[in-house]
Amino acid sequence: MLPKFAYVRPLKLDEAITQLRHEGAWVHAGGTDLLGCLRERIIDSRTVVSISGLKELKGIRKTNEGLQIGALTTITEISENSMVKKNFPGLSQGAAEVASPQLRNQGTIGGNLCQKPRCWYYRGEFHCLRKGGERCFALGGENQFHAIFGHNHICAITHPSDTAPVLVACDGVAHVAGPDGNRNIAIEDLHVLPQDDVEKETALKQGEIITHITVPDAAAGQYSSYRKIRARRAWDFALAGVALVLGADGGRISRAAVVLSGAAPVPWRSTAAEEELKNKALNAQTIAAAASAAVADAEPLNKNRYKIAMFRGMLEEELAKAGEKIGEKK
C-alpha cells in the first residue's frame, strides 16, 4: 500500500525545481522505480513532483555537441532510434537489455540513471547502513549477486543501470538544472561510492533534475557494444556486464573504454583493462591480459567469488568479437 503524499504536476521546468527544493520531495518521471520505492517505504516522500508534462525533456536529436537525449525519453525509444543504432550501437544494446518491454516503454533514461539499488536487504525490512542503520547486512549475508569492486567493506550494492555503463564508456554528460542554476556532470562522476556517502546514489542535490544527456560524436570506425549476463532473460539485473568502446588505428587499439555492470556500487571503469588494450593489437594474448587485469583487484564476498571467472570469460568473449568486427572494417 502506498503512503500518503501530495502530488503536483508542473508544466514548466522552473516550477518543478521550486517544488523539488523542499525536503521529502521526489521527482516522478516514468515511475517504474519510484512507485516501488514508495510501496517498500525505503524513501520518505511527502510530495511527488511529476515532470511527465515537460515536453522539452523528451526526444533524441543531433546537435553541435553530439547526440542529445532528453531525460524523459523512454528506454524503448533509445533502443529503437536509428541514430543511436548507427552511431552508438552499444547504447542501443544496453537500452534493449533493460528489464522487460513493458518497463522499457514506461521507464525513462533519466530514471534509469538515477534508480535506487536492488539489494534485497535495502529493499526489504532491514534497517541497513544505506537507510541510516549501522551495518550492511549483505557483507556477511546473502551476497551472491552483490559487488566485487568498490564496496570497501562498507556497502555492497551493485549499480542497477544498463545504460549508465555505456554512457560512461561513450563520455556522456548529464545536463542538470536546479535551484542554483545549471551544471554539467560527466556520467562517470554522476554516481557516488559508499566510501564517499553511503546514503546517496548520485551526485544530484535536492531540487536538481537531469534535463538531458549528451554523447559526443563517435569517432570514425569506433566500435561499441554492451553485454549482459543475468539469471533470467527478462526482468533480471546484471550478474555481470560490460560496455566496450574501442577505436583502432593501423591494426592497434588507439582508444579503449571498458566499463563493468553488476560489479560495483557504481558503473565500474576498468582502467587496468584499458591500459592492457591501448596501443596493442587485439590478439589472443592482449585479450587474455586485459580480461585478467580487469579482475585482478576484485574483492569478492563469501558467496560471489564466481563473478571473477564470469567477468573474465565474458570480457574474453566480447573482446574477441570486437577484434573480429574491427578487422572487418579494415
Image (cartoon, rainbow, N blue to C red):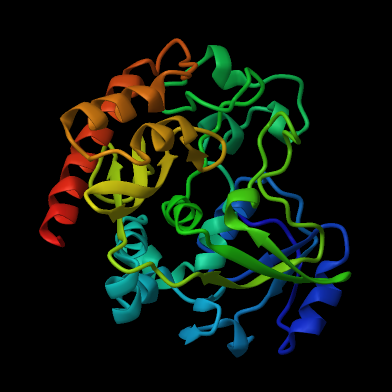
Vertical placement of residue 64 versus 26, above or below = below
Nearer to the camera, 196 or 199: 196
* Residue 77, position as x, y percentages in the image: 37, 76
Query: Residue 212 occupies which quadrant of the picture?
Result: bottom right
Could one spot residue 33 in this view of the protein? no
Q: Residue furthest front?
A: 250
Whole-percent x and y of residue 113?
55, 57
Q: Quadrant of the N terminus?
A: bottom right
Image quadrant for the C terminus? bottom left
Left-right relation of 314 to 74: left
Residue depicted at x 24% and y 26%: 288
**Residue 315 percent coordinates (x, y):** 27, 35
| Quadrant of the image occupied by residue 144 | top left
Res. 141 in view: yes
User: What residue is rendered at 39% in x and 18% in y?
Assistant: 304
1 or 152: nearer the viewer = 152
Task: Please tell me whether residue 192 is drawn above or below residue 190 in the rendered image.
Answer: above
